[in-house]
Amino acid sequence: MPTIQIDATKGAKKLPTHAKVVVVGGGVVGCSILFHLAKFGWKDSVLLERDELTSGSSWHAAGGIHTISSDPNISRLQSYTINLYKEIEELSGQSVGLHQTGGFYAASTKEWYDYLKGERSKARYMRLDQEFISPKELAERHPLIDPDHYHAVLWDAQDGHLDPSGTTYAFAKAARAHGAQYFTHCGATAMTQRPDGSWDIVTPKGSINAEHVVNCGGLWAREVGHMAGINLPVQPMEHHYLITEPMDEVVNFGQQLPHGIDFEANVYCRQEGQGMLLGTYEAKATPWKVGGTPWDFGHELLPPDLDRVADRLETAFERLPAMANAGIKDVINGPFTFGPDGNPLIGPVPGMHNYWVAVGVMAGFCQGGGVGLTLAEWMIDGEPSIDVWAMDVARFGEFATPDWGSIKSSENYERRFVMTFPNETLPKGRKQKTTALYDRMIAKGAVMDQSFGLEHVLWFGDGPDDAHEIPTFERNRSHDYVGREIKAVREAVGGIEIANFAKHEFKGAGARDFLNHILAGYVPKPGRLTLTPMLTPKGKLYGDLTVACLAEDHFMLFGSGVMQEAHRRWFEKDLPTGIAYVNASDDWHGIALSGPKSRELLARITRDDVSAEAFKFRDVRQTFVGGVPVIINRISFSGELGYEIYCKPQYLMRLADAIEEAGADLGFRWYGARALLSMRLEKGWGVWTMEYRPDFNAVESGMDVFINWKKDFIGKEATLTARNEGVSQKLLTMVIDTDGIDVVHDEAILKDGTPVGYVSSGGYAHHVGQSMAMGYVAAEFASPGTTLQVEILGRLYDAEVLSGPIYDANGVYMRS
Ligand SMILES: Cc1cc2nc3c(=O)[nH]c(=O)nc-3n(C[C@H](O)[C@H](O)[C@H](O)COP(=O)(O)OP(=O)(O)OC[C@H]3O[C@@H](n4cnc5c(N)ncnc54)[C@H](O)[C@@H]3O)c2cc1C
């Protein structure tokens, strides 16, 4: 059982009146952040805890630690977390009770075996220590297991378990050893911001002023957020595990049993003393205190309700038969906090100044170290050392209301050990945001997904009854339908909704200078468009944006929809006075037309001269199309002649009517995101969050071709260094020799059996009839013509590096 510790410093010190940082919350996450801040030099950091340390969910965690995560960078941070435990133990003199027993992930179905093969492939290029062992070998390492239930087992030597309370104290004491301070029985009861941006935090022991505040409130994250006027979409959930009486099978084994997860049975287990600990995520989640966590909740547990987990325990006992006869010593039901997609929400909150969060950390003992590292780097260096998009609080915007947060967090809890196939979309919290065309698209057979809260079309079946997926790791049932959409675009004309592109509007006399400073590329003249990377001071990619100059002092930037709040945060950080900036993404919906007949279609519904001479590639215009006011960009992401037509949401239906009517005899067809992503592969164009992300710089990604070297811009020095010294990895496009299967992302790329990189994205390129992928590999293997292998579901497929776009290499169609 976790140990509860009494804090000897209680009441001993006087709260200072000022600190560089105040961390609110002394669970494992807050203590890890305090430790990292102090270790990296911000010793003037103070943690406030309303009770004793560990008084939220940290004290009653099951203490399991493992590296597997859906996001590779989170896996890396989990590996960092586990490796950190020895350091904090030595520094603090406080045992963390680490048992690095190794851990297993047991697959009892072919699908789970396939999933684990994908995990193994990721581990391969991340150099994590994972290997497949046979069920028989597992039974030798864990004699309670009945191996007959399993196909295969993935083994990770880093996994194990620890003492949650000891670990939290070790972080806190190690932070103190580095010069930070923590105060218990000193809860934040209110906080206000001064005009200089610093925060006054009120506690029963007086007020403390701090430059930065970090909300690590865990179970009370929402309430601590309210003190600063924000609503965080996180939700505590009830969770059960049980502990058995000592078992002969455990005692007689003579060594620690490994940690383990059986996804299909939906259980995790580990040794606890001389017995076993076994936990499960119920099929029907029980959100706890939806209306708010009471302040008087302390070191308490919730009444157990074994009926809720009975079916799961039955399956578990079939797989660990000795447990069926073991006495139950304890049943723990405790709450812990989930985010809408199961990953933490960390970083500076968009729209706030010096207000940071590290909340919704549902696996604090696997991830707490990595969260602390990342947040400290972000606060001190201005950016984390690796891309932490999967944890960035900015991936949620206004749409992520408390209600939506509870619904999605519950869904995530229920699906914690449930397979999500690459072609599957999650059902809960849908239709949070829709466009005026939603019903029309559904009636036409659209299969939708949600992105930044907004519904958008993936592909079209033959009417609503045909609009469904069959979950699979292989080529899915949308394949031929997507091919049909692409044929229409490549041969005639297609239309896709573009409400989900971000739009950022800048107005003011200083806008051009500001954009020249923050963007690495060219800022266009009035009436023109440019494509530009946006870089961090360390030269990492932070955006790939289309810039439209509507007037000398009026610009519209188009970019990744999911990054819109992260970009807003970036733009607002150092926005000079006199420039009006707004994230206008919801103010502009629209339709992109693509295909050789798109000009003919457009000409039918506008009075403008849209001939090739009058409306050139990369022109932008404010005009009227289909009788409604629009902005048109003459560009396309399909590689065809094309136009992005943006209108105010209230005009979208009218615009769509006009397009459908005018396009009927031209072969017009609506298409979805899957078709678009396939077509851009044929052009070798990357996508934000996949190819383009802060893990890479402009030279590695090839985005340096868009840089305007004649000016100064953020990240110039670092990019010049990368250009002059060369880079060790490069983005490439490959064709792969597969049969009925394509990459998704995060597959290992190998050269002669040795991992040399990873797949960032890919799929089937319908027009050229090839399976394709993009990815980053060691620079020496990126030359055109190099043969590599890609690992898909455990099989190696030959791949060849391309020298350029496989379709319309010189961009003739696009410019026509
Ligand atoms: C039954 C169960 C089993 C689990 N098993 C595992 C596991 O095996 N592995 C794993 O990695 N994770 C596990 N977890 C999850 C883990 O416990 C959490 O991820 C972790 O505790 C989150 O830590 P935290 O610091 O974010 O939040 P918390 O532990 O909730 O800490 C928040 C702290 O903030 C303090 N606080 C709140 N408001 C204020 C205020 N206004 N002023 C000052 N202080 C304040 C609280 O008193 C509390 O101490 C489990 C959780 C449960 C419930």
Image (spheres, rainbow, N blue to C red):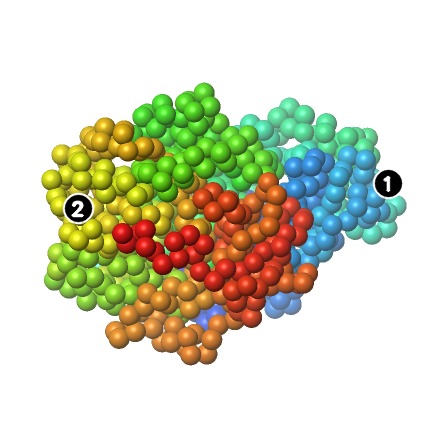
Residue 450, numbered circle: none
Disc 1 crowd rating (10 Å Cα; few below 14, some 14-19, many 20+) is: few
Residue 214 rendering spot, x and y as whole percentages? 40, 55
Q: Quadrant of residue 516?
A: bottom left
Residue 610, numbered circle: 2
| Helix, strand or loop at mark 1 | helix
Q: Is mark 2 in CB contact (under 8 Å) with mark 1? A: no
Residue 63 rendering spot, x and y as whole percentages? 64, 48
In the orientation shown, which residue stands out farthest toward the top? 465
Three-letter code, disc 2: Val
Residue under the image location 76 percent in, 31 percent down: 317
Q: Nearer the viewer, residue 740 or 699?
A: 740
Asked if one can make out residue 773 in the rendered structure from this viewpoint, the answer is: yes
Residue under the image location 69 percent in, 44 percent down: 105
Residue under the image location 34 percent in, 56 percent down: 811
* Image position of 714 (left or right of 148): left
Q: Nearer the viewer, residue 97 or 781?
A: 781
In the orientation shown, which residue stands out farthest toward the right? 252
| Helix, strand or loop at mark 2 | loop
* Image position of 222 (left or right of 758): left
Residue 248, numbered circle: 1
In the orientation shown, which residue stands out farthest toward the bottom? 724
Residue 592 rendering spot, x and y as whole percentages? 29, 42
Residue under the image location 47 percent in, 62 percent down: 803
Q: Nearer the viewer, residue 103 or 171?
A: 103
| Sequence-first tag of 2 and 1 | 1
* Image position of 489 (left or right of 789): left
Q: CA distance from mark 2 to mark 1?
A: 83 Å
Three-letter code, disc 1: Asp
Residue 673 rendering spot, x and y as whole percentages? 40, 40
